[in-house]
Amino acid sequence: MVEITYRDALRDALRDAMAADDRVVVIGEEVGAYGGAYGVTKGLIEEFGPERLIDTPISEPGIVGTAVGAAMTGLRPVAELMYVDFLGLVMDQLANQAAKIRYMFGGQIGVPMVLRTQGGTGRSAGAQHSQSLEAWVMHTPGLRLAMPATAEDAYHLLRQALTLSDPVVFIEHKALYARKETADLTRAPAPWGKAIVRRPGRDATIVTYSRMVHVALEAANRLAALGHDVEVIDLRTLAPLDIETVIASVNRTGRAVALSEGPLTAGVAAELAARISEECFDYLEDPVIRIAGEDIPIPVSPELEAGSVPSVELVVETLTRMLSR
Amino acid sequence: MVEITYRDALRDALRDAMAADDRVVVIGEEVGAYGGAYGVTKGLIEEFGPERLIDTPISEPGIVGTAVGAAMTGLRPVAELMYVDFLGLVMDQLANQAAKIRYMFGGQIGVPMVLRTQGGTGRSAGAQHSQSLEAWVMHTPGLRLAMPATAEDAYHLLRQALTLSDPVVFIEHKALYARKETADLTRAPAPWGKAIVRRPGRDATIVTYSRMVHVALEAANRLAALGHDVEVIDLRTLAPLDIETVIASVNRTGRAVALSEGPLTAGVAAELAARISEECFDYLEDPVIRIAGEDIPIPVSPELEAGSVPSVELVVETLTRMLSR
Amino acid sequence: MPINTPLLDFYRTMRRIRSFEEHVADLYVRGGTAGSMLHLSIGEEAAAAGVSAAMKPEDRFTTHHRGHGIFLARGAAPDRMMAEIAGKEVGYCRGKGGSMHIADMALGHLGANAIVGGGIPHVVGAGLSAKRLGTGAVAVAFFGDGAMQQGLLYESMNMAALWELPVVFVCVNNQYGMATRIDHATKVTAFDQRARAFGLAAAMVDGEDVEAVHAAASEIVDGARAGQPGYLAVTCYRFFGHGRMDKSPYRSPEEEAAGRKRDPIAFARARLIERGLSEAAALDAIDTAARAEMAATVDFATAATAPALASMFRDVFAVGEPEPESVRTRIARVLARS
Amino acid sequence: MPINTPLLDFYRTMRRIRSFEEHVADLYVRGGTAGSMLHLSIGEEAAAAGVSAAMKPEDRFTTHHRGHGIFLARGAAPDRMMAEIAGKEVGYCRGKGGSMHIADMALGHLGANAIVGGGIPHVVGAGLSAKRLGTGAVAVAFFGDGAMQQGLLYESMNMAALWELPVVFVCVNNQYGMATRIDHATKVTAFDQRARAFGLAAAMVDGEDVEAVHAAASEIVDGARAGQPGYLAVTCYRFFGHGRMDKSPYRSPEEEAAGRKRDPIAFARARLIERGLSEAAALDAIDTAARAEMAATVDFATAATAPALASMFRDVFAVGEPEPESVRTRIARVLARS
Ligand SMILES: Cc1ncc(C[n+]2csc(CCOP(=O)(O)OP(=O)(O)O)c2C)c(N)n1
Ligand SMILES: Cc1ncc(C[n+]2csc(CCOP(=O)(O)OP(=O)(O)O)c2C)c(N)n1
Ligand SMILES: [Mg+2]
Ligand SMILES: [Mg+2]
């Protein structure tokens, strides 16, 4: 057992993967000497050199396109996009190229790359640096999508992503980097693609991922004090989506909340609500409730920013309302 | 009443808008002498000249960025993206710029532009020229989204879009251009943002838009022959989303199908299913069923392409199953 | 007794910019600003002052994330800027934009941008409007050397040249994009060659000498107004870190010391005195006035009120359009109904 | 008696390409191909043959949507190409890709692309792999003049130059992007200047003369292999419309006639005869053989079977990963359960 931050776990995963597999290279802006905008790659250049920690110009489409080509020709690139907000610059290379190449070429070759990036609110970084855009990725056939909530998952999901044969988008959360936890990284990890019940409960199920897992757990604690026993499921990966774990839980509790930081409309919570509603129809006592980001750009003012995404209070309030009827 | 194609109705809308408002300019690849890849702007350059039908280099991000700047400074640009599949190149200019400028700048100014494009299957154009990407747009706060199914709507929604103060993404369907209908374009149009019940019915409600409206209507006809009376709602715009019309219908029929050509997962049908499930919970006899595109890239083979999106047969089969229990 | 010369005006403008940056940096460190990001333009004042003075009041512009100085040189009210950076309702953008998204339509500021290169094509659009509407206005995009590696810049240059728009591209080449020195981002730093290869008039100028910047900019801006779009690279040095908290461990103290010697304000001051256009005491008075002015903006911003929470639903769409329903309201409604 | 010279090989290659294009065009018109889009490379054969011959077997490449000729010159089996374009299971991509997405890893073809410029950065990645893995392979991106206005090209050029990768950018400048003549897409058509401004070795060559193309390409490709990435523009003429159905009403018959006179096959033929390296009858025999070969590919493709419907769920992810559940199956399951 070690005390480790999410940031350090990510770095360890990269280090271990690079040590284990020569073909792994990291490519992105400031990933070398600077150590990454959020410090994830700090120190790795000393171990692996600038040939494997490749600093790039500020050319996001070029970076992702380069990673695609490298992945097709024998390397296993980890491309870093400094902010998930820059997805808009690279969606062609990601969705039209990386995601479709295996398919369009009849299965001849895959694109075993990982696109690491980070998103979310919490640093008052403004409308173009605070988004949660996982829905665009989840909607794209051919992509895998991991969104770890814990240091342990940050480590294992990244290691696992680096063994897959298809492109993985790996979205970290900027507000989690400094989060510390006690973890045993040597323990056999949960399988890739499996959700984890972070807190068992009988009265309702919260289905979520990334930073919102901690919001849900905190809310569940407060709800417990109010006499409500809420289960919290951490999806860990959105593609694949482990709906079985969710179904089993909701069929048991009869109530579900889909919790996501991204904007409500046509977001991940919509997919979760739709899936749960169709799969658990006969077991649901209430409609699946979506708690998600407001349908607005993220304002820079810290108060407004905090108000624009789901809070512990809102989750508590919602479940209290559901469970007190 | 005139016989008119979807293509011609679009052209009429552009012509009438350009005649009525000097500030309207069309900017895009081959919009001038060539008349647009699908012929929508054919002949307009003779009427309005190359100053208003502006042919561009093949520079999609630059085109959309130019339209943003033009819209902020007194023009009312209609930017044309030849295929919606190229959204991946312009999502930054669309989602980070056009959609957020009014908000980030505290309401000082809007971006009154229309991004016209076309999507969907039906021409066996392959994985990078056949997509339905409206979910990315619908998920972006600050954007409006229109997807006409008929020539009449093509005309009116485009005219209306060209009066709005905020950016509108206007997605036509490549398989509808040649579709003819009898329309009265002088009749007062349905208001912007309102859905239309295309076929009233008592047993179930199909909620859809764009080309799938015709699939739904054809299915409803066949279902009628089988004794099932199905209502078909054409949303016309996905943002705003006229959920009231949908709720009223589903609360009456008790059964809903969300039908969309785009890929199933995290797509428009998910949002529709989630909304209907939460708004009509006590009225639903069955879960809301999503019929959507497969979660695969679009194959070029015509048989496979046709098989990858919802067919009349699948809609009939689904509703028969629902209604025969 | 100072004589009223452009150089003295430049000096005042540059001093005001630097003083603003010093004050906003201080406010940031004290936790008084909104946003984790603050990029100072210290060392780049001549680019701001020199190019701005070559523009006319009706001209328009966009900036990158390091745009405080440019906007001040174009006439911004520093108190409303400071308030915006502090995330306050009286700020230029009602506290929604912050340092990286300041804009002001009244002064032709089409917006700062947090996407490297993101604001560049907007001036192509503004140039198109100006040409079509016959306003005579030029549109200027300001951006950093980092944006020289963003493809969108070349698409924009190409369109401006092709359509002969009144557009100018100004690269504030402060030698760094974050920790990456420009020669680690590109093999060829003679950026004017690139611009010419797309059909622009192009020049590179030393950003220590504000008069030289102004002269070069005037030629390029005037040319653009006459239908020959242009490009100007202003070579300077980023005195401090990328963001306020960055201590630039990636560059040597010697390099920094040398870079900071290329100070456009010290340069202008020396020249003013040397030419007998001003004297130390008078320039000190300008400095003092600037400091007082900017200190007052901090007080103004600090005292100002934060935007009301409900304002977050405003400005997504035009006034008169329905605001997005809040998640809380929706949930209450749904649970009340079912 | 023809002597075995490179020029004769070029002639054969170019004739096979043209014959392929003529046959596939015919199949298209008869409704035998999958896909509404078909772009012929007639007139561009020298670019394909000349550059390809400058490459080694281990080299890799990507092409644009007009890539049949290039792939043929690199050794493609025309029957599998024809089958792919017809959307058949035995095609290079099992009928999933079609004309615009042909690829073959065995021959180093990293893929044709339907996004203008989309495949360009992939060669930067391939160059990175080659350099890191020490394979000695060069990676070549082929694209049209239209892609010269896509920003991604410049990002790619910049990275290739910066990292000194074994990468070559080949622009097949057929004068048109759809209906837009190149001088309506850009102010400056001396594209080699752009490439040099990013640090590439660069040349422009006349695409009528396959030997000249080969010589220029050899220099650039060899240079890239030695660490100096390069750029080559091959100037030619698109003999026919953009797509098969486009009759090019936007250009004059005179221009077309003049353009089609710049025929690399006729040019090579004349030179072969003039130099006494071959004679008309022998060249006619080559032509006849090419026609027979390509006619057979049409028969092959026509007779081949379409992919099974269920194959549509394959190849989304690697073999062994679960296939996406079909919508029909999901609905049946959901309705059966509730
Ligand atoms: C598209 C994009 N990529 C990366 C970033 C992160 N980033 C912000 S500023 C910056 C450096 C920009 O350098 P330069 O353009 O020279 O401007 P400077 O900061 O030196 O003024 C980077 C990489 C961003 N904001 N946008
Ligand atoms: C990004 C993108 N924009 C537009 C198109 C539509 N389009 C297909 S080919 C083409 C013209 C390309 O011209 P060029 O690059 O010169 O190639 P050519 O067709 O002449 O071989 C266009 C505009 C596209 N496929 N991709
Ligand atoms: Mg810089
Ligand atoms: Mg061309």
Image (cartoon, coloured by chain):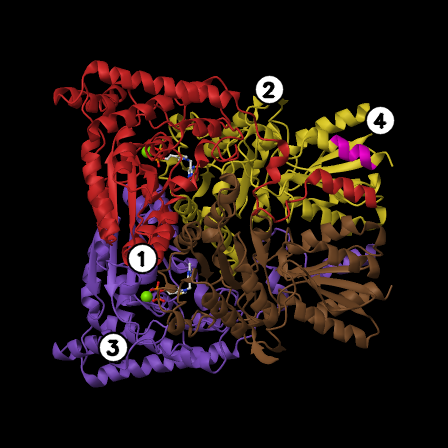
Chain colours: A yellow, B brown, C red, D purple
Q: Is mark 1 within 8 Å of ligand 2?
A: yes
Task: State which chain disc 4 sits on.
Answer: A
- Residue B161 in view, yes or no: yes
Q: In the image, which residues are magenta?
A: A316-322
Residue pointed to by mark 4: A227
* Front of the two marks 2 and 1: 1
Check disc 2 and report the residue beneath it: A2
What chain does badge 2 belong to?
Answer: A
**Residue D146: in magenta span:** no
Residue A169 or residue D248, whichever sits in front: D248
Left or right placement of residue D296 versus residue B207 in this view:
left
> Is residue D166 visible to the viewer in this orientation of the structure?
no
Which badge, 2 or 4, is on the more N-terminal residue?
A: 2
Q: Answer whether labels 2 and 1 touch (C-beta < 8 Å).
A: no
**Disc 1 designates what residue?**
D148
**Badge 4: few (under 14), some or many (20 or more) residues near its Cα, within 10 Å?**
few
Compare residues A275 and D275 and report the one nearer the observer: A275
- Which residue is disc 3 drawn over? D255
Kindly identify the amino acid type of the residue bearing the numbered disc 3.
Answer: Glu
The secondary element bearing badge 2 is classed as: strand
- Looking at the image, tell me whether mark 1 or mark 3 is earlier in sequence order: 1
Q: CA distance from mark 2 to mark 3?
A: 75 Å
Q: Is residue D322 left or right of residue A54?
A: right
Q: CA distance from mark 2 to mark 1?
A: 53 Å
